[in-house]
Amino acid sequence: MQEKYNGQLIVVYSPVEGVRNGILHKECFAYILLYYSSIGDIMSFDQVVERMSSEMNALALDKVATEVSKEVQENAVEYHETVKIGVAYWKNIRVKSSQLNEEQCWKLLAQEIVKILDDWMTHKS
């Protein structure tokens, strides 16, 4: 695996996701870790996920997010680059769709993630 990619990098990691069926709706849920690196640093994310794989579950997302942030900052010094990072996580994000369509449910959940990405992209330095 490459240490860095040229340009920006976005990773969406979900250790748990699922769908619950209601009588007149679908409910999608997920535990999600979102990572953004302005310099394309994939190794920092990968190293933390690998190192923490034994405790990598939905409940540990806050710990993983903290460790990814630390790792990226340490590696940025090594790369001699200024790096903008974003790390966010959701523990059990849920979206209900009144339609009995699972695809629509996942689209709504993805839109919530895109809102955060849009904010990061419009406020980049």
Image (cartoon, rainbow, N blue to C red):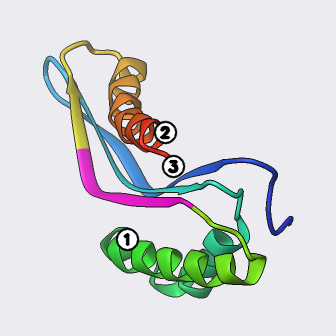
Residue 11 left/right relative to 47: left
Residue 93 vertical placement versus 50 (above, below)? above
Residue found at the far right of this picture? 2
Residue hosting label 2: 121
Residue position for label 1: 61
Mark 3 → mark 1, Cα distance in angstroms: 27 Å
How many marks do you count on the picture? 3
Closer to the eye: label 3 or 1: 3
Q: Amino acid at mark 3?
A: Ser
Q: Nearer the viewer, residue 92 or 21?
A: 92
- The mark that comes first in sequence, 3 or 1, is 1
Magenta stretch bounds? 84-93
Instruction: Identify the residue position indicated by label 3 in the image.
Output: 125
Q: Earlier in the sequence, mark 1 or mark 2?
A: 1
SS for callout 1: helix
In percent of width and height, residue 84 lies at 54, 60
The single residue placed furthest to the left in the displayed view is 23
- Circle 1 residues within 10 Å: few <14, some 14–19, many ≥20: many
